[in-house]
Image (cartoon, grey):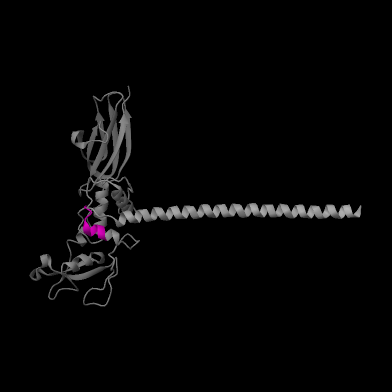
Amino acid sequence: MRKTIIFVAILGIALVGFGQAQATTTATTTISSLLEQLSALQTQLQELRSQQQTIIADLTRNLSLGASGDDVKALQEFLASQPGVYPEKLATGYFGPLTLNAVKKFQKINGLEAVGNVGPLTRNLIKNFKSKKGVSILENSPTTPIGTTTPISLGSTITICHYPAGNPANKQTITIGAAAWKAHQKHGDTMGPCDGTSSNDDEDDNDDDLKDVTAPVISDIEKEIASTTASISWKTNEAATGKFYYGTTDPLALASSTLINLASNTSHDVNLSDLATSTTYNFLIEATDAAGNKASISQSFNTTE
């Protein structure tokens, strides 16, 4: 009897140990599985980042209004990552007015002429983009100007001797943003005031900083649709003239669409009539402020039977 009791006790201990071992094995397997999944996700994320960097690095063609493709989408994603440059953050792959405005802002911030087209200088600037504070700099910036021992501090202003059109006879002392120094240095300007001149603001640099370069924001679009009529209204955050294009082509062909011009205001509306029943109409709203900055947005509506 005593031997039986001892045997049962030993068997019970063995079963408990087996259960614990089984649980430990299951937990280890679960943790290993989760670690493998995490590793796979990290690999996928790295591949996506590498793909985006490759597209940015391979910006080899000039991009301008009307262009489309993966490189345009990558450009839009890049611009969206810069504070205050591309608040709409639309990565559509189509170079429209919003992208044009964002490119101009990016170029202006970095001392380039705000032309809106992405040419060799802008492509090189994007490829060598290093700053994460909204002001990008070239690969070897900040730089120590020739004849000085103090590097330029980005975000500050500096005084230089400016030679308009490279003519020493017209030299003038001006103050510019530090980010614009690279461009001025290439044109032959020198650090410090000109001899025998007084300091003046650079009309090409400082006065431009005061100009409105922000496009209007289109919001609160409302539609009232019937069988042959439609009423569309919207608002802008500042007074802006408006253009309303509409038609049945998809995508909307502006050249063949109907255009309605609207006066400057913050509240806008159009009333459409003689529409076809049970038909899809595409429309585009364009808003232009007093400074010439433009914004646009496209939508559609369906008339009833």
Q: Is residue 185 left or right of residue 83?
A: left
Residue at 76% from the left image edge and 52% from the top image edge? 15
Q: Is residue 139 above or below residue 292?
A: below
Residue at 33% from the left image edge and 51% from the top image edge? 77
Q: Is residue 195 above or below residue 233?
A: below
Q: Position of residue 24 (x, y in %)?
A: 66, 55
Which residue occupies the foreground of this view, 53 or 254? 53
| Res. 82 in view | no
Q: Is residue 37 above or below residue 243?
A: below
Q: Position of residue 279 (x, y in %)?
A: 29, 26
Q: Is residue 133 left or right of residue 64?
A: right
Query: Bounds of the magenta span?
Result: 116-124
Figure disc tally: 0
- In the rendered image, which quarter contains the C terminus? top left
Residue sitting at the far top = 305
Let me know if residue 77 is in the magenta part. no
Q: Position of residue 12 (x, y in %)?
A: 80, 52
Q: Position of residue 213 (x, y in %)?
A: 24, 53
Residue at 21% from the left image edge and 37% from the top image edge? 254
Let me know if residue 120 is in the magenta part. yes
| Res. 180 in view | yes
Residue sitting at the far left = 169
Which residue occupies the foreground of this view, 240 or 245? 245
